[in-house]
Image: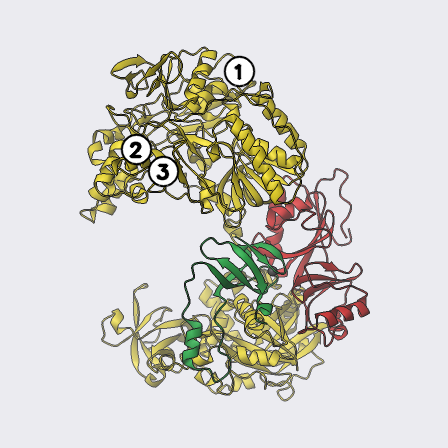
Chain colours: A green, B yellow, C red
């Protein structure tokens, strides 16, 4: 699989570390409780289709990116820097 | 000899000597091993997998199920080589397989007589009971009786190379369609890579007689080859098998670099693995001819018609003197013409409906006779023939497209599975597309190359489409022959018969995938290239479903067997993975170090001195030296990450459980990192170099993971923080200097610094100078002694080791390795990798008070879960054997005294154990349920693996200097 | 610098580039433009935020990630990174890496095919022209490739991997039948 790193260009998947679903948002702040964190850490949707995922270009620019990938075909629609995706 | 007097693409000026089963023969350059065997009248080449039936050469290509030989001998022996694809070379040595004691007389052929029990599913039915007989009796028996060639068991003496290719257009297969496509795209200036498995270009044009542009097809091939070679953007890879298609249009291929040589030249690899990324791909892999399932269709002498055509036309051999033809396709008549032109008698052309020319016999072959073929039976009539060429139709070779997820569908017009919708970026051309005539192949190649160019926005130069002689390409079907006598084989390599398919269906295995597993149809090294479709057609008939309704099996990489060595490449033995060496490595080696692998790093484990007979003696001496004098230890492999920027302190507060923002400049602090699920992730120290700059350390094992984690926090969780971070592990060589004499030694090294306890106390840090270069000094102690860590740029790491040795010579400075480091930290109860094992919490390690309640940090919320702070969780304790001299082992389980050594009594385990010089006995750290409240209690440490059972007393994990007087000294 | 190739040519010349000051330069938040301006003022270099080499003189910046560069300085003193930190104060964080990398210069007609055999990125001159930078992996070793000339590449690997990288280079050269010429820095 080739992943289009927004900085480096197209690279082989072996340069990347996979993390998973980019959707869960960390419940920031010292007030967030155990239940909110359990919801953030554990349950994951088993998506069949387009999914936004976090990948780390460990053997490249060392940047976390958000990749849009179809889990059925592995077709990749695009990728953005995670730092920018959050904004 | 059956070599024709003239013709063929062999070079008669280059005779090549070879041996088969010890007998010497001769062939020519341009031969395959199979064609050379045919030229030498060798008819019997192997025994079948299950019944040990004699088998001859069936095909002229990679789909060959019978002619599997062991090539070469000794360490270079390669079993299961297909004689049909082995390029002949001078000195080639081949041996038949799966026969005992000899090919002509095989004791195991008795399996054929027992064939009623060797039916489909026989492994499942016959050998399941009694169970204990399986390993002792059945399995060895079956392994001997049923099998392929054997590996040599010796290390592979060859080397394997790796390469990468990028192209606009990848063309797979250099037959007419592929050549036309490559030429069209190459002329337009596209980067073209064309790969061909054969050692010659041309594909079926090598075997069939056609005209292109009014000249023999071979001349056209030669002209195209010459033009391709002249085009600067075109690369032609012959002897290269494309074996797999992977996501995003990447491909794997293996090039035979030296397989056609007796021994590779010095340094020359045997094979080269290619990874290919292509913008567009044209699959021009042709088609595989199907056998016909009639009685005795596996008798040596029964061959594919296309193979006979290849042996006659390409290799100028006569596989037989009287060659009968049984054809369902129009290509049967073309073969008859080729045979007659070569002066070979054709006693009969048999077609089911009599179509053909006037000489055709309407009927079917129902039986064959002879040890090797002597005669065939057609409608009860015997016809003498020593070869029967069967033309059973064509299966487009679409496996590579299937790898990319394309689903084949059945096409009733050509009676074959085809791809209606190829994968994105790929097009099919020629026979692979189900277009079997030469004209269609040329058209497809041209059209698909132009389409690819248009896709890529490259203008195509318009060239003339070469004129081709058209050839009829009609295909009929005949899935089984009524009235067949004897076994009719579907899968020749796995001995699956027409009757086996029927039996599987009767027993309920009615999906194609179940049929495959139950009968092993298509599971041999040929992966069903010849027989799979026939088997499915029989299943469809038996279940009264339309062909294709049940789909077909999914092809997965590799499409052809690939040597594991090709994947390993240069990464074998000592170079299995990259090795990381510290700056002090050579110095350590000179000083007697034994090294241990820690991830990719080599770390000095201990330093053997003359007269020391075992490692324990060295380690004990080193640990004692640190406690009584001073020792030096290379700790460069610990991860070092520098964090800078206005928000560096805030970032560290969120990464660590404890406060780092309150750390003054010039100080260091121990820190603990959790995972978000509340378990301990890593530990280390943070030293504040400036208001906006820290350097943090990680364990050696987690260095990359912590860096990744820090970046995750910076990029994903809190991109608003203005903090930059980078690994500086490689920049700094770092050495621990520990022991009562550490200050004296460091003062000699850094005479300009005030290292007094007042000026540079425990947990102080500083940026300083050593020999007019930058250095960093930390007062950290893992050993519990007065200790420092000094870091210098790695270029000076070796010099630092030498300088420390020089400066400390007068008071016996001692280098120590990771084992002594381990002893010293166990004596002090410091957790390390064994305790930070991903399953422990801060509470488990006695560090619950390090979880700050004044801020948020990674893992805060979930670390507070009741189950993670339950006192009954196994918690860190020290363990001492009750009987002096007894040895506790790491990994031993902790059980109450008197309880049986069973899982339900398990209360924890020993994480680390060592011989402690200060205790003068074996000590251990362990995780014990409710441990801290059980100090003084006795438990058992049982290691079923080592067979030890030691009574131990639970104690504090700090065995030495519990007040920490020495490290503050 | 690389010594002249032997008259026979066709080989691969490898030299180690010593005496290089190396530093990781990371722009402070929202300061990439300010950093570029500072670099232009102090070094006369148009800094580009991308996988490209900026600068042609003694100091160069190779883009290694968003807002991140590996800066090289020929003939630098041991405290060069500190002076860079002063120059770029307030707009970038500077991290000394002068000892962190081994930098090899590969030259000759075989340099590109050799590196291509190790790296799964397209090194064709159209895709990877002179001045292009790539952080990638060769033979399981992280490597920073910089095309400094048509047939000339700088390759930076972490210093602890230098031995493994050299082993790959030597065996791959042998597999290709490529003569390997090793030069010291001073020819
Ligand atoms: Zn990248």
The part of the image, by quadrant, that contains residue B968 is bottom right
Residue B473 visible in this rendered orientation of the protein:
yes
The answer for how far apart the CA atoms under marks 3 and 2 are is 10 Å
Q: Chain of mark 1?
A: B
Residue at 55% across, 31% down? B443
Q: Chain of mark 3?
A: B
Q: Which residue is mark 3?
A: B524
Question: Residue B205 appears at what percent x and percent y?
Answer: 52, 24
Which quarter of the rendered image does ligand 1 occupy? bottom right
The answer for how far apart the CA atoms under marks 3 and 1 are is 35 Å
Which residue of the protein is positioned furthest toward the left in this rendering?
B130
Q: Which residue is mark 1?
A: B7
The part of the image, by quadrant, that contains residue B255 is top right
Q: Earlier in the sequence, mark 3 or mark 1?
A: 1
Question: Residue C131 appears at what percent x and percent y?
Answer: 73, 55
| Viewer-proximal residue among B330 and B168 | B330
Q: Which residue is mark 2?
A: B495
Looking at the picture, does residue C69 appear above or below residue B468?
Answer: below
User: Are both tags, 3 and 1, on one chain?
Assistant: yes
Q: Quadrant of the N terminus of chain B?
A: top left
Looking at the picture, does residue B758 appear above or below residue A41?
Answer: below
Q: Chain of mark 2?
A: B
Q: Looking at the image, do the residues carrying marks 1 and 2 touch, with CB atoms under 8 Å apart?
A: no
Looking at the picture, does residue B953 appear above or below residue B331?
Answer: below
Residue at 57% across, 45% down? B278
The kind of secondary structure element at disc 2 is: loop
């Amino acid at each position: 699989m080739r992943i289009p790193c927004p900085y480096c260009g197209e690279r082989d998947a072996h340069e990347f570390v996979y993390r998973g679903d980019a959707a869960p948002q960390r419940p920031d702040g010292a007030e967030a409780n155990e239940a909110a964190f359990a919801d953030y850490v554990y349950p994951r949707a088993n998506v069949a289709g387009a999914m936004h995922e976090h990948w780390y270009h460990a053997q490249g620019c060392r940047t976390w990116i958000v990749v849009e990938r179809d889990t059925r075909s592995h077709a990749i629609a695009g990728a953005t820097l995670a730092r920018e995706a959050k904004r | 000899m059956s070599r024709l007097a003239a013709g063929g693409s062999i070079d008669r000026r280059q005779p090549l000597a070879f041996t088969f089963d010890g007998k010497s023969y001769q062939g020519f350059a341009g031969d395959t091993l199979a064609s050379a065997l045919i030229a030498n009248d060798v008819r019997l080449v192997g025994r079948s997998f299950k019944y040990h039936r004699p088998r001859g050469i069936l095909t002229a290509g990679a789909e060959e199920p019978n002619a599997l030989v062991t090539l070469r001998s000794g360490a270079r022996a390669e079993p299961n080589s297909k004689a049909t694809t082995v390029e002949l070379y001078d000195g080639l040595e081949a041996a038949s397989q799966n026969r005992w004691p000899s090919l002509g007389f095989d004791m195991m052929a008795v399996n054929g007589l027992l064939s009623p029990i060797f039916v489909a599913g026989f492994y499942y039915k016959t050998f399941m009971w009694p169970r204990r007989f399986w390993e002792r009796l059945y399995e060895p028996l079956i392994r001997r009786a049923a099998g392929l060639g054997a590996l040599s068991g010796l290390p592979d003496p060859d080397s394997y190379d790796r390469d990468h290719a990028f192209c606009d257009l990848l063309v797979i297969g250099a037959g007419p369609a592929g050549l036309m496509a490559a030429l069209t795209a190459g002329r337009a200036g596209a980067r073209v890579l064309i790969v061909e498995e054969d050692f010659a270009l041309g594909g079926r044009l090598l075997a069939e007689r056609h005209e292109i542009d009014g000249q023999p097809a071979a001349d056209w091939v030669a002209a195209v080859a010459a033009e391709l070679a002249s085009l600067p953007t075109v690369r032609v890879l012959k002897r290269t098998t494309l074996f797999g298609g992977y996501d995003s249009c990447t491909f794997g291929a293996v090039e035979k670099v030296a397989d056609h040589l007796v021994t590779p030249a010095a340094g020359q690899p045997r094979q080269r693995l290619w990874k290919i990324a292509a913008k567009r791909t044209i699959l021009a892999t042709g088609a595989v001819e199907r056998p016909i399932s009639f009685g005795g269709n596996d008798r040596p002498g029964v061959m594919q018609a296309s193979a006979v055509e290849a042996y006659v036309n390409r290799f100028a051999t006569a596989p037989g003197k009287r060659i009968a033809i049984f054809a369902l396709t129009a290509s049967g008549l073309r073969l008859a013409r080729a045979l007659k032109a070569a002066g070979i008698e054709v006693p009969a052309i048999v077609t089911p409906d009599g179509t053909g020319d006037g000489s055709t016999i309407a009927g079917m072959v129902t039986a064959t006779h002879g040890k090797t073929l002597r005669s065939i039976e057609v409608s009860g009539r015997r016809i003498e023939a020593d070869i029967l060429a069967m033309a059973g139709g064509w299966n487009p070779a679409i496996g590579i497209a299937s790898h990319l997820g394309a689903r084949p569908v059945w096409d009733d017009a050509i009676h074959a599975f085809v791809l209606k919708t190829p994968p994105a970026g790929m097009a099919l051309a020629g026979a692979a597309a189900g277009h079997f005539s030469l004209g269609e192949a040329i058209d497809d190649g041209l059209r698909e190359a132009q389409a690819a160019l248009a896709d890529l926005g490259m203008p195509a130069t318009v060239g003339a489409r070469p004129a081709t002689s058209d050839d009829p390409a009609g295909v009929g079907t005949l899935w089984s022959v009524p009235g067949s006598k004897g076994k009719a084989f579907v899968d020749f390599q796995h001995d699956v018969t027409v009757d086996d398919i029927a039996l599987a269906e009767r027993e309920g295995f009615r999906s194609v995938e179940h049929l495959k597993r139950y009968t092993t149809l298509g599971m041999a090294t040929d992966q069903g290239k010849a027989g799979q479709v026939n088997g499915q057609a029989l299943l469809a008939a038996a279940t009264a479903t339309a062909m294709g309704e049940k789909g077909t099996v999914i092809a997965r990489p590799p499409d052809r067997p690939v040597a594991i060595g090709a994947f390993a490449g240069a990464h074998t033995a000592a170079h299995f993975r990259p090795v990381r060496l510290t700056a002090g490595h050579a110095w350590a080696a000179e000083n007697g170090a034994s090294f241990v692998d820690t991830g990719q790093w080599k770390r000095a484990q201990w330093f053997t001195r003359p007269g020391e007979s075992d490692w324990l003696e060295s380690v004990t001496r080193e640990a004692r030296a640190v406690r009584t004098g001073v020792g030096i230890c290379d700790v460069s492999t610990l991860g070092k990450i520098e964090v800078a920027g206005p928000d560096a302190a805030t970032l560290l507060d969120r990464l660590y459980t404890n406060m780092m923002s309150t750390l003054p400049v010039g100080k260091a602090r121990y820190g603990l990192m959790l995972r978000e699920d509340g378990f301990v992730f890593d530990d280390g120290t943070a030293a504040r170099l400036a208001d906006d700059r820290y350097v943090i350390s990680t364990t050696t094992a987690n260095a990359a993971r912590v860096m990744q984690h820090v970046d995750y926090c910076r990029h994903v969780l809190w991109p608003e923080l203005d903090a930059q971070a980078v690994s500086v592990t490689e920049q700094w060589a770092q050495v621990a200097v520990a022991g009562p004499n550490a200050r004296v030694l460091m003062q000699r090294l850094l005479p300009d610094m005030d290292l007094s306890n007042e000026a540079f106390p425990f947990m102080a840090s500083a940026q300083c100078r050593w020999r007019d270069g930058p250095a960093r000094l930390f007062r950290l102690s893992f050993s519990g002694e007065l200790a420092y860590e000094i870091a210098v740029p790695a270029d000076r790491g070796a010099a630092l080791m030498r300088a420390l040795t020089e400066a400390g010579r007068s008071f016996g400075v001692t280098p120590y390795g990771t084992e002594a480091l381990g002893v010293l930290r166990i004596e002090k109860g410091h957790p390390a990798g064994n305790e930070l094992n991903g399953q422990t919490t801060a509470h488990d390690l006695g560090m619950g008070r390090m979880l700050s309640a004044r801020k948020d940090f990674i893992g805060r919320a979930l670390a507070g879960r009741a189950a993670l702070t339950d006192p009954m969780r196994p918690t860190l304790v020290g363990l001492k054997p009750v009987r002096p001299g007894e040895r506790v082992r790491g990994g031993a389980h902790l059980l109450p005294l008197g309880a049986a050594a069973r899982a339900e009594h398990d209360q924890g385990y020993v994480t680390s154990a060592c011989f402690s010089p200060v205790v003068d006995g074996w000590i251990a750290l362990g995780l014990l349920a409710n441990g801290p409240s059980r100090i003084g209690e006795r438990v058992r440490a049982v290691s079923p693996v080592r067979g030890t059972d030691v009574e131990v007393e639970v104690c504090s994990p700090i065995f030495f200097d519990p007040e920490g007087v020495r490290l503050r000294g | 610098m690389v010594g002249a190739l032997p008259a026979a040519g066709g080989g691969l010349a490898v030299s180690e580039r010593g005496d290089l000051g190396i530093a990781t330069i990371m722009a402070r938040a929202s300061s990439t433009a300010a950093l570029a301006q500072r670099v232009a003022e102090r070094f006369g270099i148009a800094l580009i935020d991308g996988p490209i080499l900026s600068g042609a003189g003694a100091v160069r910046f190779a883009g290694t990630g968003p807002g991140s560069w590996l800066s090289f300085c020929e003939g630098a003193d041991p405290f060069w990174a500190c002076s860079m930190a002063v120059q770029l104060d307030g707009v970038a964080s500077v991290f000394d890496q002068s000892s962190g990398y081994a930098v090899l210069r590969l030259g000759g007609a075989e340099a590109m095919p050799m590196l291509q055999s190790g790296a799964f990125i397209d090194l064709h001159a159209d895709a990877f022209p002179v001045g292009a930078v790539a952080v990638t992996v060769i033979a399981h070793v992280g490597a920073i490739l910089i095309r400094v000339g048509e047939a000339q590449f700088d390759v930076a690997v972490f210093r602890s991997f230098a031995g493994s990288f050299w082993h790959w280079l030597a065996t791959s050269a042998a597999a290709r039948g490529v003569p390997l010429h090793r030069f010291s820095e001073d020819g």
